[in-house]
Image (cartoon, rainbow, N blue to C red):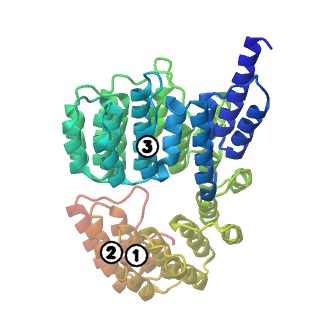
Amino acid sequence: MPTHTAAHINSSWTLAIRAAADQGRPHRAIALYLSSLRSGTAHRPCPFALAAVLKSVSRLPAHAVATAAATLHAHLLRLGLLAHPYPHAALAHLYSRDPITALSLLDETPPAGGRAPHSLLVSRNSLLASLLRSGDLPAARALFDQMPVRDVVSWNSMVAGLAKAGRLDSAIELFDQMPERDAASWNAVISGLIAHGYLVRAREMFDHMPARSNVSWITMISGYAKAGDVHAAAGLFERMENKNDLYAWNAMISCYAQNGCAREAIGVFNRMLKPHVCVLPNEKTCSSVISACSQLGDLRFGLWLQSFMGSVGIELDDHLRTALVDLYTKSGRIDSAFNLFRGLRTRDVVSYSAMIVGCGMNGKLNEAIGLFKEMSNANILPNAVTFVGLLSAYSHAGLMEEARACFVSMSSKYKIRPSVEHYTIMVDLLGRSGKLDEAFQLIMQMPMQPHASVWGALLLACRLHNNVELGEVVASKCFELAPGESGYYILLGNIYAQTNKWEKVKMLRKTMAERGLSKMPGSSWVQAA
């Protein structure tokens, strides 16, 4: 058989084996390799194919891994390929579940034509990374300290592992000892500092970097986004010289969307599409922009974005579908939301919760309950957002007892601590049902500081039921927590007006004037409930 044909056959087997391994099909990859060995003399085992097979073995059930590893180890020895960098590193990664065996492998591997030093370094780095990924920090540090030769990859792995584990002092100490550093070295420490809440120290390191990669800028922007410091994040973004990086735009859009700056998020998105910038978005970009549209209730822009995604080839995956479900439900398009929801390949707690919240907002009680039962039957545990939807649905329907039972089950059955939002819904429902004292007691029992919105819900109920005495107490709480909000003064004024207490109305108007507060345009002291 001609040599080029044999080479072609070898290449075809290798491509097929590697494809199966990359697709997460270990049995298929191993079966293909065994078939290639039986195919005749045209095929000679390829080190790249063997590395792929070893990668696949690590995905087998735990009881089968040890036997397969030992068999392939012996196979590599017979072929004389054990010292080749790729299968050697793959075997070291496979043995990383057993560091002692892995270290023995690395120490006893025979040299192979001068490639041994590089091969051993690659393998040791692979094992080091595996130990750090598994969280075995003592074993990783022991291996690092025993390595006769280290490169910047070795140092970066160890520094990043220490920083990620919260061993920041050790990470910085090791960072200071590095014989050479690159941007990844600095980024490892900066990421660790941000992850553990040391944003100021992270910024100090960032400012002292001799050269910053785009990853450095994006890491800091994301850190500020997580901390809610939108102004600092935007300042860094504007200072970036290379804005051709999609991930930088995504970080800034996500920062705005996650921190309630929806218009700014859409503004940055429009800016990245301008001809002089022309950075094409991806699924992450569109997800953040859809979230911004949901916050604004801007269905029109959301529909345009859905069409735009189709025109640039962005697939409507489950994550984007769920984001659109949220947008459609908040815009009252329940039927469209259900169509998207039913088209999901996999439904999880996020998608179910988005749909349940939408049903709750739009008074679809039966649909909300049906979805909750459906997710329970699928063994999908609810989260706090799920119960916002359920409580909203019961509140819309005025079902007091069902809402009480639902609220109690959050902590008693599902071990979910109610948030301010859950308390606000319950206070609103109790208040509208005339149970003002019970609503007041519920607020007083809250394990966290009540927000003005919770007291505001009770103040609205006091106006509905003309309860002056409690209304004055509740209004004082609102004034204390939100001194610049005139709406609470107007609600108390309405309570006074509805009970003909005009002297108190006059005094309240005077207080508002002294505090520089004015009535909202178009409002009156007597409003319909």
Along the viewing direction, whichever of 129 and 463 lies nearer the viewer: 129
Give the residue displayed 42% in from the left and 88% down from the top: 437
| In-image side of 180 versus 307 (left or right) | left
Q: Point out the tag, 2 or 3, that comes first from the N-terminus.
A: 3
Q: Point out the tag, 1 or 3, that comes first from the N-terminus.
A: 3
Secondary structure state at the residue bearing disc 3: helix
Residue 127's disc is 3
In the rendered structure, which amino acid carries the disc numbered 1? Leu
Do residues under tags 2 and 1 come within 8 Å of each other at their CB atoms? Answer: yes
Asked if residue 124 is positioned above or below residue 524 in the image, the reply reads above
| In-image side of 419 versus 302 (left or right) | left
Give the residue displayed 21% in from the left and 50% down from the top: 169
Q: Point out the tag, 2 or 1, that comes first from the N-terminus.
A: 1
Camera sees residue 235: no
Disc 1 versus disc 3: nearer the observer: 3
Q: Residues within 10 Å of mark 3 (few under 14, many from 20)?
A: many
Asked if residue 488 is positioned above or below residue 322 in the image, the reply reads below
- Measure the alpha-carbon separation of dots 1 and 3: 63 Å
Image spot of residue 430 (x, y percent): 50, 82
Task: Give the residue pinned by disc 1.
Answer: 459
Along the viewing direction, whichever of 347 and 443 lies nearer the viewer: 347
Give the residue displayed 58% in from the left and 68% down from the top: 382
In the rendered structure, which amino acid carries the disc numbered 3? Leu
Task: Give the residue pinned by disc 2.
Answer: 475
The quadrant holding residue 439 is bottom left
The quadrant holding residue 424 is bottom left
- Measure the alpha-carbon separation of dots 2 and 1: 6 Å
Give the residue displayed 67% in from the left and 45% down from the top: 26
Which quadrant would the N terminus be assigned to in this image? top right
